[in-house]
Image (cartoon, grey):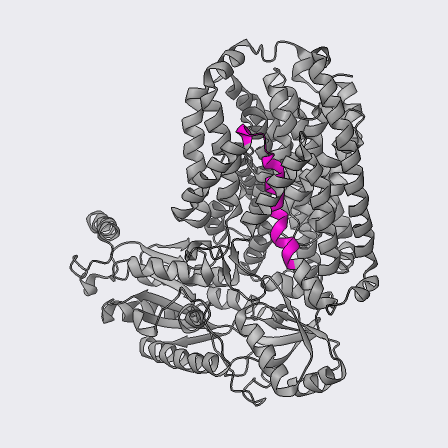
Amino acid sequence: MEHLITGFQDVLTPGILVWVAVGVTLGYVLGALPGLGKATGVAVAIPLTLYLEPVAALGMLIGIAKGSAAGSAVSAILLNTPGEPSSAPTALDGYPLARQGKAQKALKMGLFASVIGDFVSTMILIGLAAPLASYALLIGPVELCAILLFSLTFVGGLSGGSLTKGLIAAAFGVFFATVGLEPETFIPRMTFGLLELEDGIALVPMAIGMLAVAEMTLQAGNMRALDVEAARISEGARREDRVVLASEWRRCVPVIARGTLIGSAVGILPGLGASVGSFLSYGATRRASATPEKYGTGMIEGVAAAESADNAVVPSSLVPLFALGIPGSVIAAILIAAFILHGLTPGPLMFKQQPRLVADVYASMICASLIMLVIGYTGQRIFAQVIKVPLRLIIPGVLLLCSVGAYLETGSVFSIYVMLFFALIGFFARKLDFSFVTFLIGFVIGPSLELTFRQSIQILDHDVANLPGHPIAIVFVFLTIATAVWTARSNGRLAAARARRTTKPCISKREGR
Amino acid sequence: MTHSTRRGVLGAAVALALGCTGLAAPAAAEDYPDGPITMLVGYAAGGQTDLVARATAKVMSEQLGVPINVVNKPGAGGAVAARELQKAKPDGYTVLFHANTVVNTAPFIMERVDFKPDDFEYAGMITAYQVGLVTQKGAPYDTLEEFVAWAKQNPGFSYGSLSPASRMYMEQIAKKEGLDVNIVPLKGGGDMINAILGHQVVLALSGGIHNKYPDEMKMVTALTSFRHPSDPDVLTIEENGYALGMDSRTTLILPKGTPRPVLEKLAGALKAAETDEGFKKIVAAANIPIMYLDVDQSAKEMADSYAKNKGIMESVGIVAK
């Protein structure tokens, strides 16, 4: 504890605080720009970290990670083009809200949920890194495989309209994820002899194409109607459309609490990632709601659920890094390099050898949370104006940013081809009403599911009878079965509700209850 | 200065446009370098090789007096970056900093990769990878011999494999000793640490990262032909009676046809890293030993290790896929 106070004394100096603020701002702006994101920010920051002092460098990298997770909500809400795949569920309700003239409300809720999720998760990291990490080690491939299976089933129900179409989309996601080296024998699968495909289809260009380029193409086709609509949006005319009302806070607090919890848990576990966290949280919130059919039409809870979990993943994914030296996420792997650059080795020894540096990093993480609130609050007033800009000015800019973002990830034109390919798929998925959300989840979870399943077969010595040695896995297998049954039943109800709604259009009153 | 820098940029642009058609006249070696150098790295930013590359770039940039821009071109274990390098003009302004495995191992594993040592020039090697088989600190065996004895008593044990080569090691040991092993596929070093610390596997291949966990892990055998500077008492795989030792080192690779004086100049700048305090601090923190080899030594090392690895892969029946 006294270390933490020294930590704040070290961090609350202009020399350090400026770099943390630079990191958060850079992350937030890059996250808010469609097509760019964490990957871009980190690429910019890595060379810089060689020349900064350790705390400043680490503070900046953490700032980028936190800022981009929060910023990605902005483009999701305003343009329906999530800055990061993990913000895709934010767009599901955020964009309808924006089209109803409630952009500021959605942005504010997104930011508050982000900051709360991030802050609480940071506290969990500081207080419980060591005990949680050793507990996370109990989660081996067998347990992870069961958890992934559960996540896939749970999120699979998100497809909305038709369960069959949702499952088809998810299967396509899994299919595209199988491209690349097969994990056990290293035989290339469906690479068509292209070396660039040997490591699989990269997530960033795929997601940019699927989420941003496809959406922009679609909006371009619908430009006139959208512009007419935008002109009619009397943005910010009424106070209750600009701020988060007390009644909405009451509904969202449990949602944010659940999102934070889900996000923190997902972050600690290896191989899940922010997208799984935000999708799980969104799905859980929709499930728990009394009116699940209204999700996707502008429910503020949807934004709160997705963003709180999305941001809670970032700090908690550092738990295995700080406690054990295991990188739990991309940003954690880069932080390891930054630590080593400055002559430090992350892991349990770090607490003994460098308690002051650890405290400094913790203090800078807390500062980053608060800076994020300030930057986000100021920034979104500016960003919210975007909604009034005619689409013919927005689309070319977004497409340029998308190309830059896709290119920067690997530094090769091949990524742009990947982006365009998936833009095409995304376009038709939207036109034919296939859920690109379940596609994305299939793509993200697919490879981990395959790997952990194969690992499990080996670890269980090819014998199901060895499964009772893994009680956590058994629990999740039962949860999976329960979810499957539940999904089938509630989807039936949902379909019935939808059928009623189409026959009685008067229910289309705006969200409220 | 401004003029010459611009010429360098123009030259690079022309080289890009022409590809490696060899139309452009070779740059005057005595002026080299008079513009920024691009250093390709075949792994993503943030990994161990990238870390060493950036630290090396910093030292070499100070030595040569020109900026060195590190560009990550990840893919297929470095083969994508090596292909990119082959397209560059052989003037020393585009270099690849990578593990030499991309030339001396990858062709035997990946069908699409057909590099030979003669396809490139080498301007020196700087660090070595301390590859070995590792286990939990508390495991009841300390050497490979003791492990084999334990494994015979415990059929169906799990071994963590990260690459075709790491599969090959365990398959060879199991074949010779008649062991019953389950080979668990792992993705990367982080996954390996998880599997060892979480007791999911009893033995795994480590590319050197185990040195960061002296209280949790120990090495039972080195898989290199030399004993590791970090574990001088642990026997190598060859000392254990298997002719399977394969070495990998970070190497400065250049396009075929780069003039000798350019290579010498780069090697001289690379050698400075050997004694640079900042560089030593960085690699020491990651437990990476510095083993500098000059132009001739690295060319010989490349040819020798290529021939040796080829022999090993052929003798155990590994076919490139």
Say which of B108 and B304 sits in front. B108
Q: Is residue A58 magenta?
A: no
Q: Is residue A494 left or right of residue A354?
A: right
> Where are the magenta residues, as a range?
A430-451
Instruction: Reply above or below: B170 against B28.
Output: below
Which SS does the magenta portion mostly show?
Answer: helix
Q: Residue at x 72, y 85 (%)?
A: B152
Judge left or right: residue A165 versus residue A399: right
From where the camera sits, is residue A152 visible? yes
Q: Residue A432: image x %, image y %? A: 55, 30
Q: Is residue A447 magenta?
A: yes
In the picture shown, does residue A59 fall above or below B83?
above
Residue placed most toward the observer, B164 or B221: B164
Residue A4 shows up from this direction:
no
Where on the picture, by quarter, is residue A492?
top right
Residue B313 located left or right of residue A277 = left
When the figure is inspected, residue A416 is found, relative to residue B252, above or below; the finding is above
Is residue B185 positioned above or below A442 on the image?
below
- The front one of B6 and A250 is A250
